[in-house]
Image: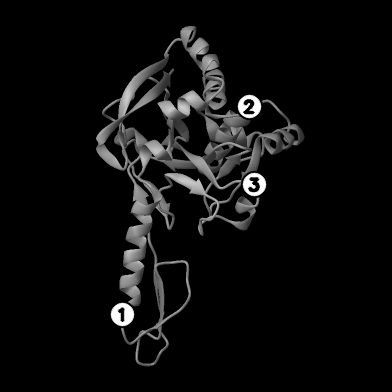
């Protein structure tokens, strides 16, 4: 299973009332969890299965299903990693908290869990960001996009360099005691009594893909639901089932595959050839 399967399943199952859909199946009570369950179903094509069958299907498709504390939210067996994000405004940024944007996911990252690292034999995975825009107070999924980290955010060293520079600067403060931490700093004995400590945390965020790629895609606000996906040529040509999506686009209203050029996240002066897949209803 890959991103092409997920897009095909989305066109065939464009569920927007996610909380109602998943609440009746006792799988989710809030929009964030419902969106994650929907993305899992898109990749696994597990919509109409009972709980036992669905669990078995998810186990066949995914090597790892995560939690809110560590990225990613899921990993496809021998395939991509997936991070699901919910926002409530069309132009809201994504809150990534202590984890900076992932160009790719690496097995030696300190931000992933042991279970994720040992889920299968892997060194790096392409990262799909699945971002859903939810109409506030109505729990309606208005927009969804899939975009790869390699097309969306800069390489790992750009963020890790900033993190290391800040961490080294904090640790250069004299007259205080530092403790081991995965955060930017944990400073003990800040005050004369030695009873006060301070945690220094990085709170990362990134503009959402709809805003980042507004130079090639604009949502149709007259439609109930909009979907957008960007896949660069290198990734597109590595997928073995693109013809299934191409065939579907020829017979489906409002499903288009367009050739575009996107900015290289590491050097915007260079343009990258990509496919833009868009769907609305």
Q: Which residue is mark 1?
A: 173
The percent position of residue 129, horizontal first and vertical second, equals 45, 39
252 displayed left or right of 204 = right
The percent position of residue 51, horizontal first and vertical second, equals 73, 35
Q: Nearer the viewer, mark 1 or mark 2?
A: 1
Q: Relative to 165, does residue 217 appear above or below in the rendering?
A: above
Q: Which residue is mark 3?
A: 121
Q: Nearer the viewer, mark 1 or mark 3?
A: 3
Q: Is residue 262 visible?
A: yes
| Whole-number angstrom distance, CA of label 1 to CA of label 2 | 54 Å
Q: Residue furthest top?
A: 251
Q: Which residue is mark 2?
A: 45
The answer to whether the residue labelled 3 contacts the one labelled 2, judged by CB atoms less than 8 Å apart, is no
Colour pattern of the rendering: one colour
Helix, strand or loop under label 1:
loop
Characterize the local packing of mark 1: few (<14), some (14-19) or many (20 or more) Cα atoms within 10 angstroms: few
Q: Residue furthest right?
A: 52
| Whole-number angstrom distance, CA of label 3 to CA of label 2 | 25 Å
The answer to whether the residue labelled 1 contacts the one labelled 2, judged by CB atoms less than 8 Å apart, is no
Helix, strand or loop under label 3:
loop
Q: Answer with the quarter of the image where residue 154 lies.
A: top left
Q: Answer with the quarter of the image where residue 58 lies.
A: top right
């Amino acid at each position: 299973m890959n991103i092409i399967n997920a897009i095909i399943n989305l066109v065939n199952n464009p569920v927007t009332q996610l909380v109602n859909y998943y609440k009746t199946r006792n799988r989710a009570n809030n929009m964030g969890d419902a969106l994650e369950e929907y993305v899992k179903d898109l990749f696994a094509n597990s919509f109409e299965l009972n709980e036992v069958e669905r669990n078995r299907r998810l186990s066949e498709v995914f090597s790892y299903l995560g939690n809110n504390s560590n990225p990613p939210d899921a990993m496809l067996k021998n395939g991509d990693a997936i991070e699901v994000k919910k926002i409530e405004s069309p132009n809201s940024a994504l809150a990534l908290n202590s984890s900076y944007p992932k160009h790719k996911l690496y097995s030696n990252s300190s931000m992933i869990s042991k279970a994720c690292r040992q889920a299968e034999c892997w060194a790096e995975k392409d990262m799909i960001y699945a971002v859903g825009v939810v109409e506030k107070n109505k729990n309606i999924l208005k927009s969804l996009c899939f975009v790869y980290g390699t097309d969306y955010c800069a390489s790992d060293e750009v963020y890790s360099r900033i993190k290391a520079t800040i961490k080294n600067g904090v640790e250069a403060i004299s007259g205080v005691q530092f403790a081991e931490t995965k955060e930017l700093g944990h400073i003990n004995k800040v005050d004369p009594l030695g009873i006060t400590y301070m945690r220094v945390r990085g709170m990362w965020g990134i503009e959402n893909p709809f805003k980042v790629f507004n130079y090639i895609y604009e949502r149709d606000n007259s439609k109930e639901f909009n979907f957008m996906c960007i896949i660069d040529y290198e990734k597109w040509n590595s997928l073995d089932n693109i013809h299934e999506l191409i065939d579907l686009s020829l017979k489906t209203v409002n499903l288009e595959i367009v050739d575009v050029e996107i900015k290289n996240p590491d050097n915007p002066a260079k343009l990258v050839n990509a496919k833009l897949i868009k769907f609305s209803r």
